[in-house]
Image: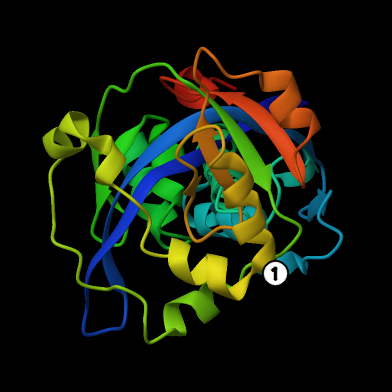
Amino acid sequence: MIRVPSPAKLNLFLHITGRRDNGYHELQSIFQLIDLYDWMEFLPTNDEQISIAGFNDVDLEQNLIYKATQILKPFAQTATGLSIKIEKNIPMGAGLGGGSSNAATTLIVVNQLWQCGLNIAELAELGVKLGADVPIFVHGKNAWAEGIGEHLTFIDLDQKRYIVLKPDCFISTQLLFSQKTLTRDTKPTKFCAYQQNSSVFGNNFEPLARKLYPEVDEAMRYLDQFGKAKLTGTGACVFVEITENMNIDDVLANSPCKAYMVNSLNESPLVHFTA
């Protein structure tokens, strides 16, 4: 049995810079990996079945973990059945990339278990078919992202700590994208501009998330007392950087919703994984 961590991420900012003819949106963002983990267990079995425990409310065929196994099957030299268990700590529908991370972890582990022989670049290319955030977790490195999120430039980021709040709501990404007032033409920028003045980099979805989901607005107003609160992804989670004068215990204890203290990661624990 193999047990591995599957990390979450924060979007340190998220700008929509355009829209493609096929309806997909062009974006720019920074993916910062954090040490909030789901834990996944993989056990080869003698039958041909793929079973997944820990996702009771998701149909097997719709589960990204299952889809990741199916996308690898054509490359498998020693395909077996798999019993996969997941301990969910990353909240769902939160903008933390939990589902994408689980899919990427599955690609990395099963690629070795089934002796598929694919390298990281090939796994990342397959991962795009599962979701735009999957490649970042396959590579396991912090990155400046463009395109629909799949064009990655790996970057070094300072070590930081964050408080992350999970408002008690589930945000519909489709609803946010459908809003006519969503800003879709933010001027493209560069990583060096972010390094010079990160405070002016926000999230185009934040105004809509705050308007449509009062729980998000409440969480952001709470964190704004201690720093500059930001929305990650399309939400619902919001976060703030921890500073030296912040009383972390008090901030966590008085939060209006579920709260986490997390550390940034330089790279995913899976970067050096071997089965």
Which residue is more in the foreground, 108 or 195? Answer: 195
**Residue 189, percent across and down?**
13, 50
**In the image, is 61 to the left or to the right of 7?**
right
Residue furthest front in the image: 225
Taking the spot 57% from the left edge, 50% from the top edge, the residue there is 220
**Residue 269, percent across and down?**
53, 21
Which residue is more in the foreground, 176 or 274? Answer: 176
Taking the spot 34% from the left edge, 51% from the top edge, the residue there is 202
Q: Secondary structure at mark 1?
A: helix
Which residue is more in the foreground, 54 or 156? Answer: 156
The C terminus, quarter of image: top right
Look at the picture and state if 252 lies above or below 208. Answer: above
Residue occupied by mark 1: 61
Image quadrant where residue 255 sits: top right
Image quadrant where residue 106 sits: top right
Look at the picture and state if 226 lies above or below 248. Answer: below
- Evaluate whether residue 60 shows in this view: yes
**Residue 243, percent across and down?**
49, 19
**In the image, is 237 to the left or to the right of 181?**
right
Which residue is more in the foreground, 219 or 71? Answer: 219
Residue furthest top in the image: 244
Amino acid identity at mark 1: Glu
Taking the spot 63% from the left edge, 44% from the top edge, the residue there is 222
- Mark 1 nearby-residue class (10 Å; few <14, some 14–19, many ≥20): few
**Total tally of numbered discs in the picture:** 1
**In the image, is 191 to the left or to the right of 238?**
left
- Evaluate whether residue 144 shows in this view: no
Q: How is the image coloured?
A: rainbow
Image quadrant where residue 250 sits: top right
Look at the picture and state if 273 lies above or below 178. Answer: above
The N terminus, quarter of image: top right
